[in-house]
Image (cartoon, rainbow, N blue to C red):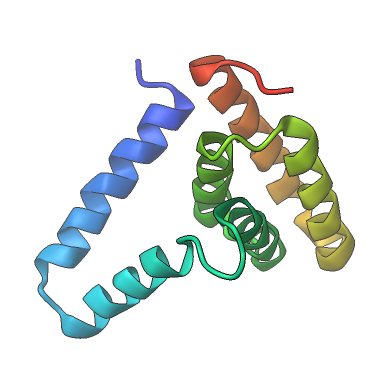
Amino acid sequence: MMDLVDEFEAYRAKMNGKILDENNKVLKRIFNLDTNSFTEGALDVKTKELLGLVSSLVLRCDDCVKYHLESSYKEGLKRAQVVEALSIGILVGGTIVIPHLRRAFEYWEALEQKFGKTE
């Protein structure tokens, strides 16, 4: 049985492939813009990932939250840093964001189980 992380990664890769196979210029440009926005610049990648995470939580996009959690994990962010960013998201987003916060914690724990715990 696939775990939570593998399931999300497989679905994301499958559907992104289908979308990009349409060869639509606008879709390809949006995907490219998204990818390039999270590269090193005036802000480092870790900061950009935390910004993406907080924005995604406030916008209540579970797929986006998972993506930024995984990227944050792979960038070496510590659990305490991620939790602090999530606390800002819940402050800004309000109690309606709590269900998404629960799923975010669940996914971070799945990342830790799959790849090892962070401090």
Question: Which of 70 and 78 lies nearest the eye of the viewer?
Answer: 78
Counting the numbered discs, the total is: 0
Q: Is residue 54 above or below residue 10?
A: below
Residue 53 % position (x, y): 64, 55
Q: Residue at x 23, y 74 (%)?
A: 28
In the rendered image, residue 104, in percent from the top left (x then y), is placed at: 66, 41
In the rendered structure, the answer to whether residue 116 lies left or right of residue 103 reads left
Residue 16 point in image, percent of width and height: 25, 57
- Residue furthest to the bottom in view is 26
Whole-percent x, y for residue 116 in the image:
57, 15
- Residue at position x 45%, y 30% from top? 5
Residue at 11% across, 71% down: 22
Q: Is residue 50 above or below residue 74?
A: below
Determine the residue located farthest toward the front in the rendered image.
42
Give left or right: position of 80 versus 111: right
Quadrant of the rendered image containing residue 94:
bottom right
Quarter placement of the C terminus:
top right
Name the residue nearer the viewer: 34 or 100.
34
For the point 35% across and 15% down, the residue is: 1
Q: Which residue is nearer to you in this view: 12 or 29?
A: 29
Position of residue 81 relative to residue 89, above or below, is above
